[in-house]
Image: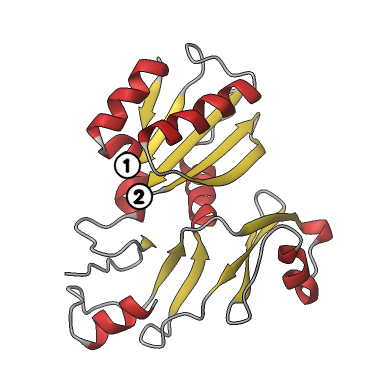
Amino acid sequence: MAELDAAIEENRIVDHSVQSGILSQNHCRFTLVPAAFYDANRKRDLLARSTRISDCEIVATDPIPEMGMHIVYADKPKPKSLPNCQNLHFLTAFLQFIIKKELTREAEMCFFAHQYQNRLSVLIFRDQNLLLANAYNTYTAADTLYYLLVLFDNFSLSNERHKLNISGDLSGDQGLNQSLGAYFANCSELSDFRSRVHPEQSAEPLGLVQTHQIILE
């Protein structure tokens, strides 16, 4: 956030029409809470059960009514220079896109994976019911392949029969894309999601679901 504030102050934002938007935070420290068990007054306690929270961090919540749940996560205050922007967890943006654009009644099992730098985000559905929403730290292509293969095995998915829907660096990195092709017979690229979440030529690791495109020079 400090980098984004500085870029705006130094006039390094290409698109000066930005009045509103959504800053998507891509990190692992979150938890999913069914709406029936969610208590806004206890969200810090809910998150502390599964991860550490520093004193300088706030705890934010994104409701996902289509799934009947909330994503509760550690966050930082939004940039003062973008008062009308809304903070959002990356998985919230990912889920909203998949629910609206990709989730179909025909597919019994749906597997979606998005890689951005060293973070792999995964969604798995069965008959439109969410089975898994998680994120993993990955540092090599082997790490990414390991998590995908283990998840396919854990959920009894067939590398030959079930489709692996990919986006981000999974489709943009040629070497990684070739490695996926060696293990997964049926890969499909979510190119529309990639263009929405990672604006071209962005110099900062900020996922942006755009109402106005923000590009750092």
Quadrant assignment for the N terminus = bottom left
Task: Give the mark, 1 or 2, whose residue is nearer the N terminus.
Answer: 2
Q: What percent of the width, then of the height, locates residue 27? A: 50, 58
* Residue at the (26%, 37%) spot, across then down: 173
Q: Amino acid at mark 1?
A: Asp
Is label 1 in contact with label 2 (beta carbons under 8 Å)? yes
Tag 2 secondary structure: loop
Q: What percent of the width, then of the height, locates residue 145? A: 44, 29
* Residue at the (76%, 64%) spot, across then down: 46
From where the camera sits, is residue 97 visible?
A: yes
Which label number is shown at residue 117? Answer: 2
Which label number is shown at residue 169? Answer: 1
Few, some or many C-alpha atoms within 10 Å of disc 1 (few <14, some 14-19, many ≥20)?
some
From where the camera sits, is residue 209 visible?
A: no
Q: Is residue 188 left or right of residue 110?
A: left
* Residue at the (30%, 68%) spot, across then down: 212
Tag 1 secondary structure: helix
Which label number is shown at residue 124? Answer: none
The alpha-carbon separation of the residues under discs 1 and 2 comes to 7 Å
Q: Give the answer, above or below, for where 125 lies relative to 160.
A: below
Q: Nearer the viewer, residue 159 or 110?
A: 159
Q: Is residue 156 left or right of residue 43?
A: left
Q: Is residue 99 left or right of residue 101?
A: right
Q: What percent of the width, then of the height, locates residue 83? A: 42, 85
Q: Nearer the viewer, residue 77 or 143?
A: 143
Q: Amino acid at mark 2?
A: Gln
